């Protein structure tokens, strides 16, 4: 099993533990303020309520570590392995988690506001009720992640993979979802008011009750799996997203589909035109 180091409540501020083997170490409530833990092994370590303010854990291995309620303000977790780590209620404000591995990590109610998660792996991670306001999740992998009731206000999710993720009741107000993949994601009752949806993929996504602006217009899932969305704004403008097509005028959208009325997919075209009629009545 290996030795267990008893460092509970120890003052280890600004210490150098680079490449140290702290597997299964007891660091409960330890003071690790600005401590250097680069490439350290902290597998199964107990860091419950530890203070890791501005600690450097670049390339460290924290597989299955318990960081419940830990303070990780501005901590460096670049390429850190946090597979199945427990980060419930952890404070990761402005932390750098660039290319970090958070596969199956539990981040329930964690504060990741302004955190940088560029290219991070959050596959199957639990982010229920987490705060990700203004976080950078560019190119992050959130496949099958649980983002129920998460706050992603003004978050950057450009090119993020959110396929099959659960975003039930998520707040995505003013977020950037350009080129994001939300195929088969659950966005029921989510709020996407003023979000940037340019190039985003919503194939077979659940958009039941999803809010796309001040005028609530129901999205339409066409028989071929392509969602039709009308995003409205306070200034009276709107944008229609339909598969790979974007329209800023309802008549242009109608003219586009009428050109295909005689095609083999005329039934699909009819669905699109019927939905546009409903949108026009709502606007």
Image (tube, helix red, strand yellow):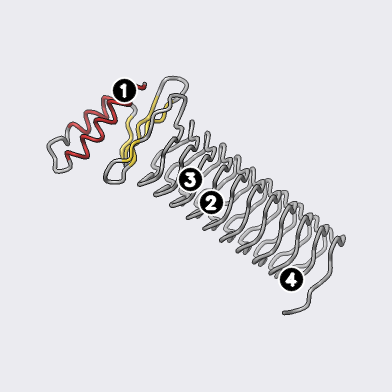
Mark 4 or mark 2, whichever is nearer to me: 2
Which of the marked residues, 2 or 1, is nearer the chain's N terminus? 2
Residue 141 pos. (x, y %): 50, 55
Which of the marked residues, 4 or 2, is nearer the chain's N terminus? 4
Indicate left or right for 238 with 58 as reference: left
The residues bearing labels 4 and 3 have C-alpha atoms spaced at a distance of: 37 Å
Indicate left or right for 140 with 216 as reference: right
Q: Quadrant of the N terminus?
A: bottom right
Residue at far left of view:
262
Q: What secondary structure is marked by label 3?
A: loop
Q: What secondary structure is marked by label 1?
A: helix
Mark 4 or mark 3, whichever is nearer to me: 4
Mark 2 or mark 3, whichever is nearer to me: 2
Q: Which mark is residue 158?
A: 3
Q: Vertically, is 118 above or below 250?
A: below
Which of the marked residues, 4 or 3, is nearer the chain's N terminus? 4
Q: Which residue in the structure is indicated by mark 4?
A: 24
């Amino acid at each position: 099993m290996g030795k267990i180091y008893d460092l509970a409540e120890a003052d280890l501020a600004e210490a150098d533990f680079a490449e140290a083997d702290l597997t299964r170490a007891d660091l409960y409530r330890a003071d690790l303020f600005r401590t250097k833990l680069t490439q350290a092994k902290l597998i199964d370590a107990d860091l419950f309520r530890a203070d890791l303010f501005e600690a450097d854990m670049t390339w460290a291995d924290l597989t299955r570590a318990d960081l419940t309620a830990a303070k990780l303000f501005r901590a460096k977790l670049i390429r850190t392995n946090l597979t199945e780590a427990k980060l419930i209620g952890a404070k990761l404000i402005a932390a750098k988690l660039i290319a970090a591995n958070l596969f199956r990590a539990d981040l329930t109610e964690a504060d990741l506001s302004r955190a940088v998660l560029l290219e991070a792996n959050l596959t199957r991670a639990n982010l229920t009720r987490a705060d990700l306001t203004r976080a950078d999740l560019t190119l992050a992998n959130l496949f099958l992640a649980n983002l129920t009731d998460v706050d992603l206000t003004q978050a950057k999710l450009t090119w993020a993979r959110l396929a099959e993720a659960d975003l039930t009741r998520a707040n995505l107000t003013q977020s950037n979802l350009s080129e994001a993949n939300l195929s088969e994601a659950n966005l029921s009752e989510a709020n996407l008011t003023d979000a940037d949806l340019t190039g985003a993929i919503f194939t077979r996504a659940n958009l039941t009750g999803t809010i796309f602006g001040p005028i609530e217009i129901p999205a339409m899932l066409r028989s071929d799996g392509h969602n039709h969305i009308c995003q409205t704004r306070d200034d009276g403008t709107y944008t229609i997203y339909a598969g790979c097509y974007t329209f800023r005028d309802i008549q242009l959208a109608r003219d586009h589909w009428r050109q295909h009325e005689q095609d083999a997919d005329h039934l699909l075209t009819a669905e699109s035109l019927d939905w546009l009629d409903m949108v026009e009545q709502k606007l």
